[in-house]
Amino acid sequence: MHDAPMPHAASGRTATPLPPPTAEAAAHSQRLAAAIGDEIAANGGAIPFSRFMELALYAPGLGYYSAGATKFGEAGDFVTAPELGPVFAACVADAVAPVLRQLGPGALMFELGGGTGSFAQVALMRLLELDALPSRYLILEPSAQLRERQRARLFEQLHPMLFALVEWVDGPIPHDWQGVLFANEVLDALPTPRFAIRGREVLEHHIATDGGRFVAQWRPADAMLCRAVRHIEQGLGRALPDGYQSEVLPQLPYWIQAVSGGMQRGAMLFVDYGYARSEYYQPGRDEGTVRAFYRHHLHADVLAWPGLQDVTASVDFTALAEAGLSAGFDLAGYCSQANFLLGNGLAGVLARIEQIPDEAERLRRTGEVKRLTLPAEMGERFQAMGFEKDVEFGIAFLAGDLSHRL
């Protein structure tokens, strides 16, 4: 493919008008589109949607997360909780501090996807206050541009003693270790297969090309995807109806095992948007949850401008719980982001905000808390799930635990 594919709604609905990219950005997208087109041609004329998503997000030097485009904040495509201010990271630090203290010297903190470095900055400063510093703070970041941005920020903002703890790694920890693994808005970016039910047969969404455009094809699913869909139906206690479309991550247990690696003792904490399985696969959600973020536009046109937009899917937290248990962890708890923050130091944060003398700053920080906790904002749409192995989170999930919904 040599022409950049224009917006094309994968669901068949009318495409949302999107702000046009700059000439430089469009050329970048054309290069990635051509590379994807070459792979499609080399693989019999179609590739699974999960592979398209993988290339769109992670193709070396071209994918959304591996290239240099601005992603976070008002100038990017979306805003994550750590970018709003220090509240989120401080509360997460309060939650994991008991685990790090239990593990003692040698405990590691392992963050997947470091964003701008804002989370690491606040978390390290708060863990110092709580006397719970890890021996090293590791960041797994696929984007070279983001690594440099993180490094510059942390070098400038942290005391040299804290900055010396930070290390960037290229993959999971390759040796036995003890510590805490943390991931905020990472699971939603795992390349996911999409499926459809046609006359009780499971089909898989593939991407082909037609006249310089990416188009959808449905092909019989392989055995792994079929088993994953039947497992969903077994858990629901009902068959998915004919015509139902959604997505599932059969590889999630293997991914959890890979990223936790040789963790002998410790905890994992995931925060993301999603649902328990019964809500994820409810009859009314019959086109799945895959969507794209482009310049703060949330839309269904996931094939538009590869490399320039985030492609994402909600998290099935029941599947995450199953994957953590199969990897040898115990489920510590599951709750909304609002209740997680309330249970991990938010009251103290609010008390400190009330003491801020500058009214504008006080209002800004109050607005941050509202965005993090209000149901119409991030408070209920985002969920937190923790796992533990020979340690205890303590009170981290006591406020509003939803494990019974799983």
Image: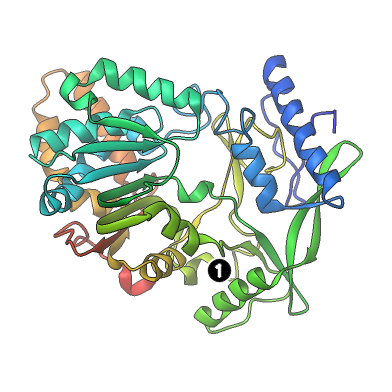
Tell me: 235 left or right of 221: left
Residue 243 versus residue 321: which sits nearer the camera? 321
Q: Quadrant of residue 284?
A: bottom right
Q: Quadrant of residue 227?
A: bottom right
Residue 311 to residue 202: above or below: above
Q: How is the image coloured?
A: rainbow
Expressed as whole percent of the image width and height from the top left, the position of residue 247 reads: 61, 61
Residue 204 to residue 83: above or below: below
Q: How many marks?
A: 1
Q: Residue drawn at (68%, 69%), measured in percent from left and top?
A: 244
Tell me: 229 left or right of 355: right
Residue 376 versus residue 308: which sits nearer the camera? 308
- Write down the residue under mark 1: 281
Residue 382 in sight: no
Q: Where, quadrant-wise, is the N terminus in this rendering? A: top right
Residue 24 in sight: yes
Expressed as whole percent of the image width and height from the top left, the position of residue 46 reads: 82, 51
Provide the secondary structure element on which disc 1 rests: loop
Q: Quadrant of residue 202?
A: bottom right
Residue 325 to residue 165: above or below: below
Residue 290 versus residue 145: which sits nearer the camera? 145
Q: Where, quadrant-wise, is the C terminus in this rendering? A: bottom left
Q: Tell me the amino acid under the disc marked 1.
A: Tyr
Expressed as whole percent of the image width and height from the top left, the position of residue 314 reads: 51, 54
Residue 49 to residue 115: above or below: below
Mark 1: few/some/many CA within 10 Å (<14, 14-19, 20+): many
Q: Residue drawn at (85%, 28%), measured in percent from left and top?
A: 2
